[in-house]
Image (tube, rainbow, N blue to C red):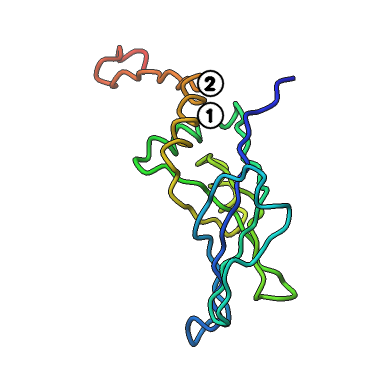
Amino acid sequence: MDTPPTLHVAVVFERQRDPSPWEAWRHEPVEVVQDEGGFGPAPRTLRDDGRTARILHPGLPVQLHRDEAEGYYLNLSSGQPVWFVMWRVSDEDPSQAWPEQVTLSYHEAGRLLDAQEHVDNLPLPPEVAQWLQEYVDLHYRPEPKKRRRPASFVDPDKR
């Protein structure tokens, strides 16, 4: 069995305390970077001034699967390819959030959104877009569309 092509990434999350009168905490992913193992295995705080914090979450795999090739194609053909970051907030401590999954598939991101998950997107660097394009070129073949003849061209006895 072939091992799927995999990139390891780290996600930088920003956490804001009291960003508005209606929110106690706001979380959002702000950057996805390739993780070549130098970040270590555990999340770490990059900056925290008491109001805004940036936390690095390393070691997330991004695997490519043949059955998602159309989703990768749709991401690339959107004009602005992106990382899709699915993340969660702790039920016990709403000041804590973390990335659960990173994908490059438009379809997978849609399924996650349908399941009421938090999914944000961040710009995909050109070198990763090129890597993804090579995979799509190798594994994606659009389904041929069946041409339907207008009813005016069909024999009236066969309508």
Q: Which residue is at the front of the view, 103 or 34?
A: 34
Q: Which residue is mark 1?
A: 69
Q: Which residue is at the front of the view, 149 or 25?
A: 25
Q: Which residue is at the front of the view, 142 or 154?
A: 142
- Residue at 53% of width from left, 84% of height from top? 18
Q: Quadrant of the C terminus?
A: top left
- In the displayed structure, 45 sits above or below 124; it is below
Q: Which mark is residue 139?
A: 2
Element type at marker 2?
helix
Find residue 139 and report its horizontal and vertical position in percent.
Answer: 53, 21
- In the displayed structure, 85 sits above or below 144; it is below
Q: Quadrant of the N terminus?
A: top right
- Tell me if label 1 and label 2 are in contact, CB under 8 Å: yes
Residue type at tag 1: Ala
Find residue 98 and report its horizontal and vertical position in percent.
Answer: 65, 61
Rendering quarter of residue 119? bottom right
Tell me: 49 left or right of 2: left
Element type at marker 1?
helix
